[in-house]
Amino acid sequence: MRKMGFCDAWVNIVMHSVSSVQFFVLFNGQPGKSFKPSRGMRQGDPLSLYLFFIVSEVLSRLLKRATNFQFLDGKPQNSTVYFSVNTSVALAHELSGILEMPVVEDLGTYLGVPTMWGRSKHDALAFIKERILAKILGWKQQFLSKEGKEVLIKAVSLAIPTYPMNCWRFLYEPESLWVKVLKDRYFPQDSFLTAKLGERGLWVWSSLLEGRDLIIRGSKWQVLSGNSINLWKDNWVPGILNSRPIPKDGWEIDKTRVVASIIDTERRTWNEDEIGDLFFESAKAAISRIHIEDSCSPDRLIWPASKTGPYSVISGYWWLRNSTPARKLNRPSTSHSVLPQLGSSESKSRFLSQVAFSCWFIWKARCDAVFNGLSPSPSHTIFNLSSAWKAFTDANSRIHDLAPSPRNNHLCEVSWYTPHPSVLKINVDASWRHGASSTWVGLVIHDSRCLEVRRMEVLASFAAMDESLVVLEGCLLAKGLNFPWVVIESDSKLVTSCLQDCSSSCAWELFPIRVCIWLVGKAFQACSWS
């Protein structure tokens, strides 16, 4: 670079970027020890492209010099040229002669994806099926059990289409060069979430929009400030139908209203009176369970099928498989003709559960009309039925993901000791019961003597959430005692590790609570978690 005229400051910056690269390997989802490569830059570093140009220029000149001195006999021909079908054969032949490059009709693949995309989706995506079949044919000669082949097929089929499924990166990497190029081309005055196909959109762009629409259906907004979430159009309420509340019958709505309008900004709590006026009881209860701790951070679009929030190919396949509507059945005359068409015993059980839910809510609406004199509302009944069924299926599908680990893994042994006179220690604990919407937590604040003991009830959907909420409460109480150093002790290893490392990811439900704990922790000279 110095030979090419770059200044020493630039050279030093580039060499520092190259020499400071570190990698680590994920093993069972946990990062191993970091190591430094002998060459190369960070994955996705935009500087790599420009350094490649510099190095290729030097290599080109070295090859040219070696050719002039007859150190090399000939030069490999790796360059080709491709012309549009609208280019005449004579013109293409003339230009290829000037460029000294052969004409090709197929540009091949890049990163496993075809470079040229035609009008046919079947032909464009045929490579995925062909590669999977090639793997399967090779496995037939190996001594694998049926279960082993199934695992390998799933692993390969999940990995092959990874590159075409990049819609989520539009939302999380808005400053990427490729995102900026597509934005300037297709939606310069809009966002990716609301972009239109347009009259001259290529098939690749239309395919990305189809993937976007699928992601929008499965994703939800996490309320932080509430300023960027539409109250009626966006998915933001977990546990109800489509994660989108509907207004009470006869209520006129403002379609531009945002979620922040029903938040008490001073206390950072929901405006219960306004929520009660706008929504049905089931939606009101679901909204009340949403924790809104932070008003400074922007709202987040999260993928609930993933434990930490960002979209992944595996969770996308899982969600798509579990959310695809079942095929419409022929209208049978009896239940005996329905059940055989449902296939597995799991499908039959799911169908019977839906029937039981429907019958119960219809019967409940009938009793309210007969005995309480309430006018029946079909839309209200359907909404309550759908919300209850959605909550039931979500709880069943995520029970494995959100259930706490066995106690000997989830909890860590804590050796208690008396703190230094200038240090305030807060010990917290929670008692969580599976299936409960609320739980009891407790905390003890003390220096060399006990200063305060408190017990309270909090809304929590899983064990780590109630532990996080009591940690937040302890920080808020300690803030008013004016101690410079604070130590918070919890027996939840998941919560303490999440708070100790700001680079680590946590369950998306804990994200707003963690942000608020960190903001409160800035009031102390030092705040540690153990």
Image: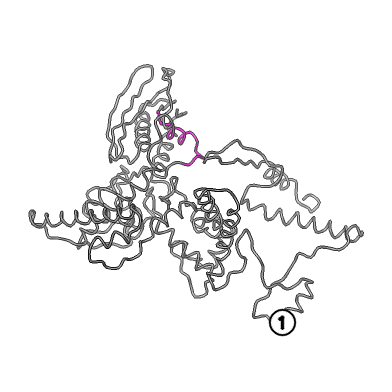
Residue at 32% in and 21% down = 451
Instruction: Estimate the x, y position of residue 484 in percent, counting from the top left.
Output: 43, 26
- Above or below for 496 versus 264: above
The C terminus sits in image quarter: top left
**Quadrant in which residue 383 is drawn:** bottom left
Residue 447, given in percent of the width and then of the height, sits at 38, 20
- Within-10-Å neighbours for mark 1: few <14, some 14–19, many 20+: few
Q: What is the tally of numbered marks visible in this picture?
A: 1
- Image quadrant where residue 21 sits: top right
**Which residue: 66% across, 52% down?**
47
Q: Is residue 335 above or below residue 33?
A: below
| Residue position for label 1 | 89
**Of the pair 34 and 183, the residue shown nearer to us:** 34
Tell me if I can see residue 486 in this picture: no
Helix, strand or loop under label 1: helix
Drawn side of residue 83 relative to residue 442, left or right: right
Left of 244 or right of it: where is 371?
A: left
Residue pushed farthest right? 69
Q: Above or below — where is 98 with respect to 40?
A: below
9 vs 318, nearest the viewer: 318
Question: Which amino acid type is marked by label 1?
Answer: Val
Q: Identify the residue at image location x=19%, y=53%.
A: 360
Asked whether the viewer can see residue 339, the reply is: yes
- The magenta stretch spans residue 397: no
Residue 514 position, x and y percent, is 42, 39
Q: Residue 77, percent across and down?
A: 79, 65
State which region is magenta.
Answer: 490-505
